[in-house]
Image (cartoon, rainbow, N blue to C red):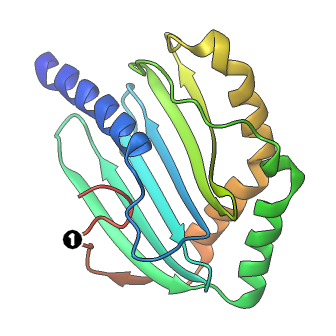
Amino acid sequence: MWRKVIAFLLLSGFAFLAAQTAPTRQHGAFLVRMDETELTLHPTAGPNNVGNCLVVAPDGRAHLELRRQEFLNGRASLVSYEGILNPKELDILQTILDGDAIRSLPQFVIPASPLASFHVTNAKISRPSGIEEVGYFEWQGEAPANAASAGENWSRSALAMKPLVEWFHSLKSTYPWKRVPNPRSGVCGES
């Protein structure tokens, strides 16, 4: 049993890092791609491993993927949704992305060896000069090896990204999404 738990934790950590460093697979340009991952090592009433990904195109087309896994039984699920944001919703998003709080954030630094319970949120934002990647990492238990050098930036980013994360959570839970078959190409960067 413990070998399964340890193997799962190691695979989850590596999958998290691979998803963060893998190039975004594009079927055209995107305005923003947001990822939010949470891994809890403690027993919970819900999933222990949660991953949400949202990709929004400049024309408002949106793709949402929700991943859930219970590490005690190993079953994982992936559900995909699509929708089109209206001009007002797209304008709100663009205002958040273009605000000084987001534009002034440092490049997101991936945590070194996240083997504790953690929560990570990052966003890749398409800018005329290239892709801006911002994000933060929070943990419980042993700190990542690079927490001393990156921790202050993660805290600053968590505060600055709060409006964007709240927008994401609100859209995820209140938008009239249409469930679609899971894509074979891995819209959110995984196959």
Q: Position of residue 61 (x, y in %)?
A: 53, 83
Rendered-image quadrant of the N terminus:
top left
The residue at the point 26 percent across, 79 percent down is: 181
The kind of secondary structure element at disc 1 is loop
Q: Nearer the viewer, residue 158 or 131?
A: 131
Q: Position of residue 43 (x, y in %)?
A: 36, 30
Q: Residue furthest right?
A: 100
Q: Position of residue 91 (x, y in %)?
A: 78, 79
The residue at the point 50 percent across, 15 percent down is: 144
Number of marks in picture: 1
Q: What kind of residue is marked 1?
A: Arg
Rendered-image quadrant of the C terminus:
bottom left
Residue 46 visible:
no
Please give the residue where the numbered disc 1 appears in the rendered image. Answer: 184
The image quadrant of residue 80 is: bottom left
The image quadrant of residue 59 is: bottom right
Q: Is residue 46 toward the left or the right of residue 35 in the image?
A: left
Q: Is residue 62 toward the left or the right of residue 129 in the image?
A: left
**Eyeballing the image, is 178 above or below 163?**
below
User: Within 10 angstroms of label 1, few (less than 14), some, or many (20 or more) residues?
Assistant: few
Q: Position of residue 187 (x, y in %)?
A: 36, 67
Q: Residue furthest front?
A: 129
The image quadrant of residue 190 is: bottom left
Q: Is residue 182 toward the left or the right of residue 173 in the image?
A: left
